[in-house]
Image (spheres, helix red, strand yellow):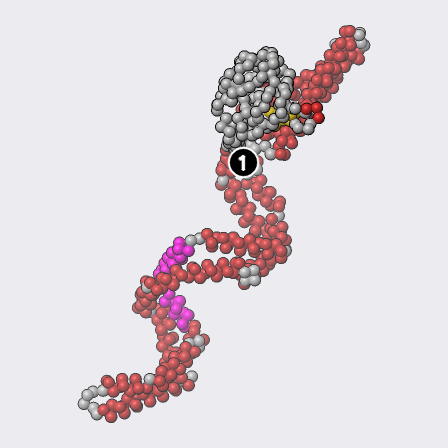
């Protein structure tokens, strides 16, 4: 039979005793109850040959034969494994395995026999501090490139140092000729150049070797001053009116914009963007506020503007052109129709106004006579364009038009009538509701690609583009407007623009700024170290050669 192995805490050999194969079962205090043979003497405080049974909780040193019982919750006893920790497996013989191969069985029991609670999720990664850079994949690749170049530059320094040592050794130990002196001089100067350039490059980002040498760690310590200097440099060399004007003039914005707008596809794009902007602006506006503003503006304009002279001029022109005759025709026709259908009303009105001493039949005859004459007059006026009454109407309208323009009393009466009309609530409601109608009309036109508004805007843009592409005067005028606007903004808000640079740099974290800049330019700076090594070696060789040539 197979037995469950026992691993001694002291690192002793694994022993197996007789017994049935046992597998630990999750959820039990021991995980498995099996006969275990004793460990060698001295292992875990038990004598040789003693059976290993459950020990009391918390008993670490046990004599031979002491029973080992299950430990209560929280004690240091082990249940099914040698570590006593939940979730740590034990080893049991696998049935049918060749050579008694052991199988690791995970024990998920706890002191209370229940499954352990799930481990808490790791805390979320805190966001980067304000002013700190976030290194993306491209930055990490740049930093790896910087490290590679640092390795190469440092390796070159080690190489020239090794060459120097070997040259000196060859000179003194082997009695090498003059060539060793030349090699040593070149290697020595190469080391000097490499070390000097290493110091210069390193001093930009940190203190070399951590030493508090003055004027080192330039970028971390002088970050704010660099930001101020950069802002001043941009303001003086990029935001001056002459530079901006010359740059805009060199671009030829007018011609390029005209050629671009002349393309129908580009005109469609601009039209769609303008429609979207217009629709968005109208959607954001509050109708109540706009209605109040529009109503107040219309009312104030109508109250301050004198309308009588304008009405008089319009009426005078209408009468001169004969445009009023249709209105007279309509009035005559309506009056005739009313008289035909309301003859009894005319007769009754005449009879009601007659004196009481006249006979009734006389009153009726007079009423019928008045009705017939009135009907005949209206009929003749309706059917005869040259009727004297029509001429009287023409003269009245001409006189009234003249009074509206020149007569003070007539004009004052019209103004009072206007004020009374504007003060009525019905008129104010109509004025306020005009905005809703206008807004709906504009939005509908902006959304419809085939609306008259969008078609006209598109055609106007294409026409404007064609003119801009060919008309030099129009190009110069447009470019002058653009240059003036841009120069005004740049010169007026130069301080605010440069303060954006200064404040942004001041808000950066010094360490992260140094690392970020080094990631971007550090690779090229390592070439300075390499070049310094090479140039130093060549310079040292040249100096040594010259000194030997002159016998120094």
Which quadrant holds residue 459? bottom right
Residue occupying the point 39% across, 62% down: 431
Residue 432 seen by the camera: yes
- The residue positioned farthest toward the right in the image shown: 177
Residue occupying the point 52% across, 60% down: 445
On the image, the x and y values in percent for residue 60 come to: 53, 15
Residue carrying label 1: 235
The answer to whether 311 is drawn above or below residue 147 in the figure is below
Query: In this rendering, would 235 be left or right of 416?
Result: right
Numbered range of the magenta stretch? 287-316
Residue 510 seen by the camera: no
Residue occupying the point 53% across, 15% down: 66
Query: In this rendering, would 159 be left or right of 488?
Result: right
The answer to whether 19 is drawn above or below residue 306 in the figure is above
Q: In the image shown, does 433 or 110 lie closer to the viewer?
A: 110
Q: In the image shown, does 27 or 267 lie closer to the viewer?
A: 27
Looking at the rendered image, the quarter that the C terminus falls into is top right
Residue 64 in the magenta stretch? The answer is: no
Circle 1 sits in a helix, a strand or a loop, which is it?
helix
Residue occupying the point 78% across, 6% down: 173
On the image, the x and y values in percent for residue 119 come to: 52, 31
Q: Counting other residues with Cα less than 10 Å from the Cα at mark 1, is it few (<14), some (14-19), or many (20 or more)? A: some
Residue 299 in the magenta stretch? The answer is: yes
Query: In this rendering, would 63 be left or right of 286?
Result: right
């Amino acid at each position: 039979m197979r037995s469950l192995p026992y691993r001694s805490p002291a690192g002793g050999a694994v022993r197996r005793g007789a017994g049935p194969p046992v597998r630990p079962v999750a959820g039990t205090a021991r995980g498995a109850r099996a006969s275990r043979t004793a460990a060698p003497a001295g292992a875990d405080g038990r004598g040789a040959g003693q059976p290993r049974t459950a020990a009391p909780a918390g008993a670490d040193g046990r004599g031979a034969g002491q029973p080992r019982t299950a430990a209560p919750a929280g004690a240091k006893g082990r249940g099914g494994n040698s570590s006593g920790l939940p979730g740590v497996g034990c080893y049991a013989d696998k049935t049918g395995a060749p050579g008694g191969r052991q199988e690791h069985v995970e024990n998920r029991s706890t002191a209370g026999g229940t499954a352990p609670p799930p481990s808490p999720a790791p805390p979320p990664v805190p966001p980067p501090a304000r002013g700190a850079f976030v290194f993306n994949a491209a930055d990490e690749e740049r930093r790896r490139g910087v490290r590679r170049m640092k390795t190469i530059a440092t390796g070159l320094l080690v190489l020239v140092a090794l060459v120097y040592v070997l040259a000196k050794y060859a000179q003194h130990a082997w009695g090498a000729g003059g060539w060793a002196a030349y090699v040593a001089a070149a290697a020595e100067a190469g080391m000097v150049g490499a070390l000097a350039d290493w110091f210069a490059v390193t001093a930009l980002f940190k203190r070399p070797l951590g030493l508090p040498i003055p004027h080192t760690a330039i970028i971390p310590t002088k970050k704010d001053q660099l930001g101020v200097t950069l802002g001043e440099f941009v303001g003086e060399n990029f935001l001056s009116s002459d530079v901006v004007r010359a740059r805009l003039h060199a671009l030829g914005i007018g011609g390029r914009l005209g050629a671009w707008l002349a393309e129908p596809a580009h005109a469609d794009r601009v039209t769609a963007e303008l429609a979207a902007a217009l629709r968005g602006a109208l959607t954001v506006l509050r109708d109540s506020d706009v209605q109040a503003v529009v109503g107040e503006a219309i009312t104030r304009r109508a109250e301050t503007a004198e309308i009588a002279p304008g009405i008089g001029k319009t009426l005078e022109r209408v009468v001169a052109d004969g445009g009023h005759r249709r209105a007279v025709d309509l009035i005559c026709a309506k009056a005739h129709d009313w008289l035909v259908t309301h003859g009894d009303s005319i007769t009754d009105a005449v009879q009601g106004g007659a004196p009481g001493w006249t006979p009734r039949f006389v009153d009726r005859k007079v009423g019928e006579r008045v009705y017939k004459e009135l009907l005949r007059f209206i009929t003749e006026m309706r059917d005869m364009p040259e009727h004297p009454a029509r001429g009287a109407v023409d003269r009245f309208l001409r006189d009234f038009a003249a009074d509206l323009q020149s007569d003070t009393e007539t004009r004052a009466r019209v103004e009072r009538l206007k004020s009374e009309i504007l003060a009525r609530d019905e008129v104010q409601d109509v004025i306020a509701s005009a905005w809703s109608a206008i807004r709906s009309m504009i939005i509908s036109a902006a959304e419809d690609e085939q609306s008259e508004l969008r078609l006209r805007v598109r055609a106007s843009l294409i026409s404007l583009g064609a003119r801009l592409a060919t008309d030099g005067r129009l190009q110069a005028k447009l470019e002058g407007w653009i240059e003036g606007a841009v120069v005004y903004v740049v010169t007026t808000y130069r301080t605010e623009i440069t303060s954006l640079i200064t404040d942004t740099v001041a808000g950066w974290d010094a360490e992260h700024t140094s690392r970020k800049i080094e990631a971007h330019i550090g690779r090229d700076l390592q070439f300075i170290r390499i070049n310094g090594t090479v140039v130093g070696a060549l310079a040292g060789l040249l100096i040594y050669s010259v000194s030997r040539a002159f016998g120094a």
